[in-house]
Amino acid sequence: MTRRYDLVRCPNQKFCTTCSGNSIEIALRSFRGIIYANVSVNGEYVCCGRPCLPNAPIFPRPAEDAIGGSFRFICEGDDYPDWMSFGTEACYLVLED
């Protein structure tokens, strides 16, 4: 199943969701045109300062296995995620579980 998250058009933001009974918090920060992610699962960080790439998992494989899913940005034309495109068809976040 794929869940879509339409993000707010804002350079720095944080949101929470759940997957397979796990509490997930994702903080996104923009710095010099690149979006970076800090992700915690059940209060424990699984990645900090990870650059977000188009159509690539946000956090490492062991964390994906632990929560039973993968977050990734879907971006038009394989462009890098850009906060100015958040909330549009050009760039959004999905959870594939």
Image (cartoon, rainbow, N blue to C red):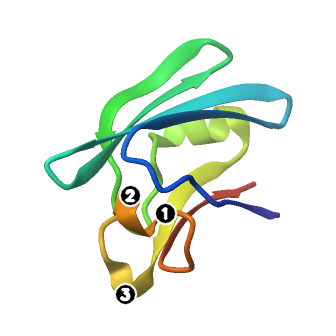
Residues tagged 1 and 2 counted as in contact (Cβ below 8 A): yes
SS under mark 3 = helix
Residue furthest toward the top? 43
Q: Amino acid at mark 3?
A: Gly
Q: In the rendered structure, which amino acid carries the disc numbered 1?
A: Phe
Residue for badge 2? 83
Count the marks.
3
Q: Which residue in the protein does label 1 denote?
A: 86
Ranked by sequence position, the earlier of labels 3 and 1 is 3
Quadrant (top left, top right, bottom left, bottom right) of the N terminus:
bottom right
What residue is shown at x 56% (from left), y 79% (from top)? 89
Q: Secondary structure at mark 2?
A: helix
Q: Residue furthest bottom?
A: 77
Is 62 or 54 nearer to us in this picture?
54
The residue indicated by pointer 3 is 77
Q: CA distance from mark 3 to mark 2?
A: 16 Å
Q: Which amino acid is tagged 2?
A: Trp
| Nearer to us in this view, 22 or 25 | 25
The residue drawn where x is 67% and y is 32% is 66
Q: Position of residue 69 (x, y in %)?
A: 68, 48
Rendered residue at 33%/60% (across/down): 53
